Amino acid sequence: MSTPTPVIEGGPGDPVIGSPRSAPGHPDGAGARKAPWWRVAVSRSVPILAALAGIAVVWYAVSYLVLPEQQRFLLPPPHEAFGSALSNPQLMGPMLEALARSAGVAMVGLVCAVVLGIGYATVMSQSGWAERILYPYAVILQTIPILALVPLIGIWLGYAFTARVVVCIIIAVFPMISNTLFGLQSASPAAHDLLTLNKATRWQRLTKLQFPAAVPSIFTGLRNASGLAVIGVIVADFYFQQGAPGIGGLLRTYTLRLQMEALFTAIALTALFGVVVFSIFAALDKAVVGRWYGGHTR
Amino acid sequence: MTGTATPTARPTLALTGVTKRFPTGTVAVRGVSLALQPGDFVTVVGPSGCGKSTLLRLASGLESVTDGVIDVESAATSYVFQDPTLLEWRSALRNVELVGELRKVPGDERRRRAQEALDLVGLTGFEAQHPRRLSGGMRMRVSLARALVADPDLALFDEPFGALDEITRLQMQTELQKLFQLKRFAGLFITHSVSEAVYLSTRVLVMSGRPGRIVAEIPVPFEYPRPPDLRYEPEFAELTGQVSHALGEHS
């Protein structure tokens, strides 16, 4: 009782991961033997390239071996499909402009969906009543086929930027709502008790427990929402033809005009766009959530 | 070192005829009375599901009583959960700081006290580590540090060492008993281990099966600090025998 020195001799004696000196700031003991980045990049891209090569092989086979010559325009071989479009600035210029326009709409829609989704989920997390009242609307929004709503949105909001953003939001917002809500509710009952015992305010509970606990789920939601925002903008472009076209609008134009080379190039660009957006947010998810738990990846 | 309380002191925690009936109709505890003076370390043993944890939740105010009275004379009460209950996105130090943050203690003082508490439980050098990088025993130490950081008058323990392996568990018992000697809070400790109950406490209360009632009270006369080898002394064995016997009669 009289001695102010620590009472525990020998320090922590139970099994220890790392030592006090080396552990802080060193995420992994194996870090020193980590493969160089280029090797990681190669090993990750080989399967993707192999898959692309496989697709090309099948594509050529169908073009040259399956289709009779007079029907080859339905599936021109890759080098013709992309080659003629890529070498044609009159085609590629507007196509890339349209893609940029669509990307802008998708990002604005995604940001709105994130803000709205997190806000909606936060309100729901504050009481059982709010959740019971508000959750069904989120589910309804999710289950109505977007194509049923698109004409209505067009009538109300016109056929330009705003309407396209709204379609994006409607498609992308649900994973934000459901993942955020799941995350906000993921803290253990004991953790809630801990805050209750320390007389935490509602605001402290939200900011010090529920939100931090929800961060990994929010990033999962963001990853899913980003992919859906891309789909949303293509759908919106496809139906809202007035004003400057997005890439989805061009898809429709090329289809109507049977411009097969342009159509294939636009589809490939769209797919690439989706993959890039999804990869960016998947990488963001991984990076943030890894750091969140002190350098541990999931 | 038992019964150090002066007769004039009001008990830190007093339960009088406490009964808890849940809305489902289950009676978890019935007619429990107990008093903790400053310097008392009381352990409660009983069969699983006998309402031990409910007793602790009642004492902490997390649950309200159906009948009876609970008096708490404590400026700061802390609670140690079965699970360490650490916030995984916070370092060990920041986990201990949480209590001060919620009570709006200024940052410098908060950090200094959290550091002291971590030093006290032997985690010097592990301040920056996140819970995932700590072993089970170390996580429980952080949890103990968080309970001690507010300098509690009353400390409630809900089977905190139940999930630890035997070696770590014995070690944690030794250390908790030293911390108790140093800090002299009034402690109420729930466990289902008879030897843990006897080793830690000034007094063992035996609870019956549901609805939980206190059926025996066995004082433990050993001085603190208690050497780990106390567990192999004949007097110790005799006391654990008494507790086990009381448990056997009423479960």
Image: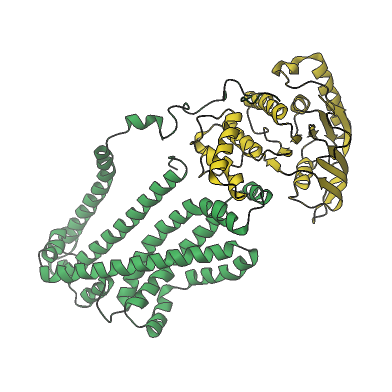
Chain colours: A green, B yellow
Residue A102 percent across, percent down from the top left: 29, 69
Is A78 left or right of B238, judged from the image as shown?
left
Using the rendered image of the protein, determine whether residue A160 is visible from the camera's viewpoint: yes
Split into 4 quadrants, where in the image is the C terminus of chain A? top left
Whether residue B125 sits left or right of residue A255 in the image: it is: right
* Residue B86 vertical placement versus B134 (above, below): below
Q: Which quadrant does the N terminus of chain A fall into?
A: top right
Res. A221 image quadrant: bottom left
Quadrant of residue B112 in the image?
top right
User: Image height check: is A290 above or below A15?
Assistant: below
Q: Residue at x 29, y 56 (%)?
A: A276
Residue B220 image offset from top left, x and y in percent: 83, 24
At x 75%, y 22%, the residue is B224
Relative image position of residue B117 (x, y in whole percent): 60, 34
Residue B83 visible? The answer is no
Residue drawn at x 20%, y 52% is A57
Relative to B13, say whether A252 is above or below: below
Give the image quarter of residue A66: bottom left
